[in-house]
Amino acid sequence: MIRYSLKRLLSLIVSLAVASLVIFFVIEVAPGDPASFMLGINAQPDTVAALRAELGLDQSKFARYIEWVSGIIRGDFGTSYTYRTPVAEMIADRLWVSLPLALYALTLSTLIAFPAGIYAAARRGKGGDMAVMGATQLGVAVPNFWFAMMLVLIFAINLRWFNAGGFVGWDSGLWTGLHSLTLPAISLALPQAAILARVMRSALLDILGEDFMRTARAKGLSKRQALWRHGVRNALIPVLTIIGLQFSFLLAGAIIIEQVFYLPGLGRLVFQAISARDLIVVESVVMLLVFSVIMVNFLVDLAYAAVDPRLRSRT
Amino acid sequence: MTRNLIIGATLSSLVLLAALVSFVWTPFDHAAMNIPAKLQTPNLIHWLGTDHFGRDIFSMIMVGARTSIAVALVAVGIGISIGVPLGLTAAARNGGWLDELIMRGNDLVFAFPSLVIAILITAIFGAGAINAIIAIGIFNIPVFARISRGAALSLWQREFIMAARVAGKGTARISAEHILPNIANLLIVQGTIQFSLGILAEAGLSYVGLGAQPPTPSWGRMLADAQTMVSFAPHLALIPGSAIIVTVLGLNLMGDGLRDYLDPKLRVART
């Protein structure tokens, strides 16, 4: 297990290094000099040069890459070109919206998907199964930002149960904060719940055909007892993997949903930064998203290996 | 034929038909503004109503189908034309450094959600349909590489491949002549699924302004335009949204149906 973990850790570090190289140099080839952009078209050349020096843009690309990466490792993402504030602070502020939103959506999607998937598997081929499967087909086909608009139309504009957009902040209390994230979380959760319910159902169906399930029934457990004690537990492994992967997708997917609800999260930060050519912010947010995907994959792999020893030798 | 396949193929053909017909005929010019007729709900003259500039929504939906289909189709094409050769090469060199390199490269691309790739590309080259295609296409590459590698690996163990080897064929020729035809079914099914994901991705990118730019009509941007008017003109959002749902649902059902149809073993196992 230790050897496997070390091997995975090494490949994690290599992946992160390559990802950071790709992100940095892809952004570097972007046309347009941030310093000239910030100062406008009427700026004097020496002013631009001074700003370039201040931002560190006059150093070689490689030196700046090294500085960027070593900064990130220390938790220092550099200084925003436009706002002149530390990028780490800006990201941390926005994470207070994006992270709870992703977690909220993940919780909702799990709460919807588990019962739906288990119900469908238990009634395989019957009306209930068909209804759940039909609903999941629809759930996968609905664009979440459109669903978000419909939720706003019904629950914010017509029924007035929620605000149509914006975030009140956590200072006004946990409940109020969660309340203003509810519609965004539901719209993010729906397609994920549809996918998860399908995974839950098919994982359970695989398990239900196993010999140990027949043994469980033979030793006197009722269908329901066997399903819960042996079926659901075993089906959890593939399902947890998908949940892990969904988290990073939710974090990235929130970028669009934040636009619908005008939420001050990472997504809006990225869009503002792109239009202001605040490249260091774009770089850092993209790196953070990619880091979270790679990290989650790594943790899922480790969790898998801890549960199933056969996987350790396979790598 | 399965029911899924029939329903899915019907829905998808309807959308494709609308896109094709739009080249020769639309009820109105999709870009023609007619302010006096703005924000009409569906009626006999404007079948799906008009938008805030008085443009005919039915015509815009038809032309928008073109954008969606073109973007998703080319993106799937990129995925197949780069991903499949990579996957086949990796399988042919199973366990070698080339296999390892290709698969690790795959993992790396997987770590960039397509939206993030799109944001990166937009940050560099600006927004537009071509950049949306590239962003979605790049994300399709590892999908096809992985699936063709997995399927090819098991084929390499089969007798008819051994026979081809004994006959003196090289790995590249075996991959092209024997492996590829045998994984074609799988690629068609996956292609359908990626196509529907491409439609969704294009809509999302256009919605946030990273996709097709005006005056090219696109379903995603119609939704973005509708957002501020949804309270008094809900049809502006309902109609493009339904167009997306019908297309994606149709393609997904067709993908599921094709999988069952092309693989009789699964027909029993899946029901």
Image: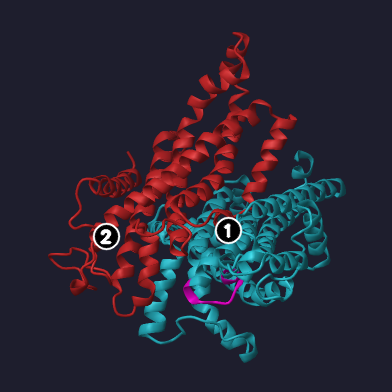
Chain colours: A cyan, B red
Secondary element at tag 1: helix
Question: Which residue is farthest right?
Answer: A2
| Front position in the image: A174 or B27 | B27
Q: In which image quadrant can residue B144 be found?
A: top right
Under mark 1, the amino acid is Ala
Which chain is indicated by disc 1? B
Whether the magenta-drawn stretch holds residue A150 is answered as no
Give the residue drawn at x 52%, y 62%: A192
Q: Same chain for marks 2 and 1?
A: yes
Q: Amino acid at mark 2?
A: Ala
| Residue B31's disc number | 2
Task: Residue A47: give x, y in percent of width and height.
Answer: 70, 69
Q: Residue furthest top?
A: B167
- Give the answer, above or below, for where B190 lies relative to A99: above
Helix, strand or loop status at disc 2: loop
Span colored in magenta: A260-269
**In percent of the image, x 30 and y 69: which residue is there?**
B236
